[in-house]
Amino acid sequence: MGNPQIATRSGVFDAAGFERAFLEADYVRCRELLSAAPRTDASALALSRVDLRDGHPVEVVERLLNLRPADPRGRAERDVWLGAAYGATGDSESAHRFFDRALAGLRAPDDLYYAAVFQKAHVHWMDREWKLMEAPVATLIDSPHAGYRGRGYVLRGWMHAGKSGDANGQAREYLRALDEFDSMPQPDLRLRLNTLLTLAALARELGLASVADRVRTAYDAMNPTSGMHVQYFKITRILGWIDALSGNELSAFRRFRQAAELAPSDLWRVQCISDRATLARATGERAFALDQLYAAHDLASRLSWSDAIEEDRITLLNLAELFGDVDGALAQRYLAQFRSLRTPMDRRMGFANDARVRGLEVYSSGMALLRLGEVVAARRMLQEAHEIFLKFDYGWRAALAALGMHKATQDAHWLHSARKSIKRWPESWIARDLRDAQQAHSLSDEESMVTRAQRPILRLLLEGRRNADIAEALGKSPNTIRNHIAEIFRTFDVRSRSELIALLSRRTR
């Protein structure tokens, strides 16, 4: 968005400098420049853009509601930012009323027209109105402006994730968005950084090595400004988990330490300390894990968690999980504290109403309950987490949930599920834990791939026994045996017992 010249007491407002600072996400500099300007309609609109980016929508509503710019374009811009502010506060009806009024007087290829289209689509996204998003998203992607094409791809990425759980599709759209942002002569660094943050998270969850490399390259070239610190911190932390999952635990510990130093608040600092405790526990460094765990507890116990947004409150569940077999009373305390803070998630968040957040919640809750000995409730939660993570192809998290279910049930079928899910992370601590669990279970690889009921059937199949013989030997009906055999064939991806015998004989040579 351009900004008109604004007369100041000391001369002319530096509109170009303001725009440059805005695109660099240097909101402190933006406010400094505006503080020298008289209070005009143009300065009020410019400050509202800064406040919207900086997370202050209520101030924008209060500032613009009674603003009456003399020119039609000023009125249209007022309506766009006022609508965006109403949308951010949850008043979608008012938001769309102002957007529609602005759009009545705007036309392509005016960048203000595309700003209004984007903000309208964004409010539809916050309300999960996927069908209503389609037309404005298509308009953005057809825009001559790279910045708005990128925004369109971002929104289409969220449509992939929200409508069908297609996280891989979301990653593809975000890569297109990043290409668009990188092609701009002067990129909007806040938009670009938000895109990198989501790509980093998807690279971690989906095992996308090339995407992780692209994020690292961009991260290493960053010089974060006042409006970029939160995203920069979060990317640092995510890169730590990417390192951990690739088996580079030393680098991961360094990243977590760096993230703790960058943390914008003590709430986030607790996350980084608990990250180190989690990884230390996973790598067998029990003394260090306990040291970090109690350091996290010491800080967490002094904070007001009602100030945390929902995703960050999951740190309480992480602490409950870690304390589950260390100090049961503290684990129960953290579980109770999390439950006491159950309020609707801030709708402005990227993961508002996203099933993936639910998966994180029920996994950590389930593991805490499992370590506290509440097995029935733990199984229910871990199974739900496993289903969510499988839906989104979050393999390593699905493997963790499967290992938890194996511990809760001693059913080797869960080891098979974990083995399928962890293939993209062979050097991770999860893969090591899986190998240890398989060895402790004293099952052959083949037996660990089928359910407990199917193991004797598999053994008899490999002996060449017919269905009727197997049914008689096991005291089961022929139909039951036939159904189990069909499931065994699906498990090993074969179509006949001869294919099964040939496959498994090759594995045992």
Image: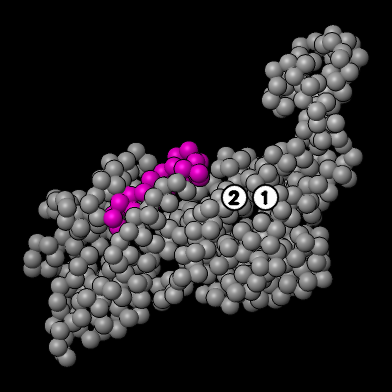
Q: Label 1 sits on what residue type?
A: Trp
Asked if 453 appears above or below 358 in the picture, the reply is: above
State yes or no: residue 212 in magenta.
no
Residue 21 location in percent, x, y? 31, 75
Count the marks: how many?
A: 2
State if disc 1 and disc 2 touch (CB < 8 Å): yes
Q: Residues within 10 Å of mark 1 (few under 14, many from 20)?
A: some
Q: Label 2 sits on what residue type?
A: Gly
| Residue underneath mark 2 | 207
Visible residue check, residue 237: yes
Q: Residue at x 71, y 53 (%)?
A: 427
Which residues are the magenta region? 146-170
C-alpha separation, residue under disc 2 versus residue under disc 1 = 7 Å
Badge 1 marks a residue whose secondary structure is loop
Q: Residue at x 81, y 62 (%)?
A: 284
The answer to which of marks 2 and 1 sits earlier in the sequence is 2
Q: Residue at x 86, y 15 (%)?
A: 464
Residue placed farthest to the bottom in the image?
Answer: 10
Badge 2 marks a residue whose secondary structure is loop
Asked if 405 appears above or below 338 in the picture, the reply is: above
Image quarter hosting the C terminus: top right
Residue 184 location in percent, x, y? 30, 61
Disc marking residue 356:
none
| In the image: residue 328, left or right of residue 201 | right
Q: Quadrant of residue 82?
A: bottom left
Query: 247 and 170: which one is in front?
Result: 247
Secondary structure, magenta segment, majority class: helix
Disc marking residue 425:
1
